[in-house]
Amino acid sequence: MLLFLASWWLLHHGFYARDQIVDLPVYEKYGERMTRGDVPYRDFSVEYPPAALPVFALPAIGDGGSDTYRRGFEGLMVAFGAAAIVCLALALTALGAGLGRTSAAVAFAALAPLLLGSVVLSRFDLWPTAIVVGALAALVHGRLRLGSGLLGLGVAAKLWPGVLVPLALTYVWRERGRREALVCGAVFAVVVLLCFLPFLVLAPADVLDSVWRQARRPLQIESLGSSVLLAAHQAFGLDLTMKSSSGSQNLEGTLPDTVAVLQGVLQLVVLVALWVSFARGEVTRERLLRYSAAVVCAFVALGKVLSPQFLIWLIPLVPLVRGRRGLTASVLLAAALVLTQLWFPYRYWDLALRFDEAASWLVLARDAVLVALLVVLVEPARSRRTVGANS
């Protein structure tokens, strides 16, 4: 906790405090509308799922300006970050991890914000991340229904935890049987429904549009496909056009659109392959945590949108992986965090508006490191073979 609080404090000073790109004005606008009595989705458009709304509304309660809102929002994020670290430690306790492994994992998670930079301060991603780590901790402790319910809350907060649901239900099925898996699936569905239902009743089209809006986003400029096109632009003069839409800067045109479709297909194929691979192999707690880190990494690395804050999701998951694989994966994640900070936020607008050469190669390097991280997480363990002297 002390390391995490020290990291948070340092993010407000020195070069971390310069050139910040924040989402707080958007969150503050949502919060102010809700505190005035406006209903989300019906009275104003919201691009996030319903379980994200309390995070926007709570800092807006009472009279205060933007500074008051920022302090309240950051207070919530500090609490969620601390909760994620506690849940990380609880998950490792269930595995019987020793003091060395546990200390290294929680220290990595506590110091990782310094590697990623100021984006941690002004995004709400620590909220769904804390929920997901709590869900995994519950699952490996045998609290299967609690874990399933938390996954439902995570999906209702930011959708991406849905990639973990097939793993969780497979784990429950193999541990406790089909009946318990059906019960856990029902618990998950009920939590999601309870979060969405009031707004679906009041404004069904607007709620569904907020979900569909995420699926139809174009090729964002930091994604893997975009980074390859940017590299081609730098190396061969490929003509590219940037257009701001859907809350991000994206590449526009026939080629980027085609790459976006192909990348979406690749992402889905890899996710399905990981779900099937997990189901076909030995289902253990260690393997559940490793595959959880892998599917989230695949979702991040292969998605057509790769905002810097998406890396927050991986910070408490990758250190859960044991052994040399876990150490290598943590080193790769640390490299991806640092590479992200080298251009975001300092060179981001140079990248988006002018396709800055240095930033373009940094984006490609970061995305390549994330792909390498995925490979490390999913590659089969090497079997040890003893070869006889006379063979």
Image (spheres, helix red, strand yellow):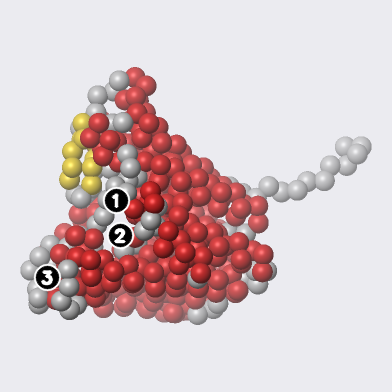
Question: Tag 3: residue type?
Answer: Arg
Q: Earlier in the sequence, mark 3 or mark 2?
A: 3
Q: Could you tell me which residue is drawn at 49 percent across and 76 percent down?
A: 138
Asked if the residues shown at circle 3 and circle 2 are in contact, with their CB atoms under 8 angstroms apart, the answer is no
Q: CA distance from mark 3 to mark 1?
A: 25 Å
Question: Tag 2: residue type?
Answer: Ser
Q: Which residue is mark 2?
A: 122
Q: Could you tell me which residue is drawn at 61 percent across and 67 percent down?
A: 102
Near-viewer residue (83 or 137): 83
Residue 223 placement (x, y as % from top left): 34, 42
Q: Earlier in the sequence, mark 2 or mark 1?
A: 1
Q: CA distance from mark 3 to mark 2?
A: 19 Å
Q: Quadrant of the C terminus?
A: top right
Q: Secondary structure at mark 3?
A: helix
Looking at the rendered image, the disc whose residue lies closer to the viewer, 3 or 1, is 1
The crowd level at tag 1 (other Cα within 10 Å; few <14, some 14-19, many 20+) is some
Q: Secondary structure at mark 1?
A: loop
Residue 262 placement (x, y as % from top left): 33, 39
Q: In the shown orientation, is residue 340 left or right of residue 219?
A: right
Q: Earlier in the sequence, mark 3 or mark 1?
A: 1
Q: Which residue is mark 3?
A: 33
Looking at the rendered image, the disc whose residue lies closer to the viewer, 3 or 2, is 2
Asked if the residues shown at circle 2 and circle 1 are in contact, with their CB atoms under 8 angstroms apart, the answer is yes
Q: Secondary structure at mark 2?
A: helix
Residue 214 placement (x, y as % from top left): 24, 54
Near-viewer residue (206 or 61): 61
Asked if the residues shown at circle 3 and circle 1 are in contact, with their CB atoms under 8 angstroms apart, the answer is no
The crowd level at tag 3 (other Cα within 10 Å; few <14, some 14-19, many 20+) is some
Q: Could you tell me which residue is drawn at 61 percent across and 66 percent down?
A: 103
The total of numbered circles placed on residues is: 3
Q: Which residue is mark 1?
A: 20
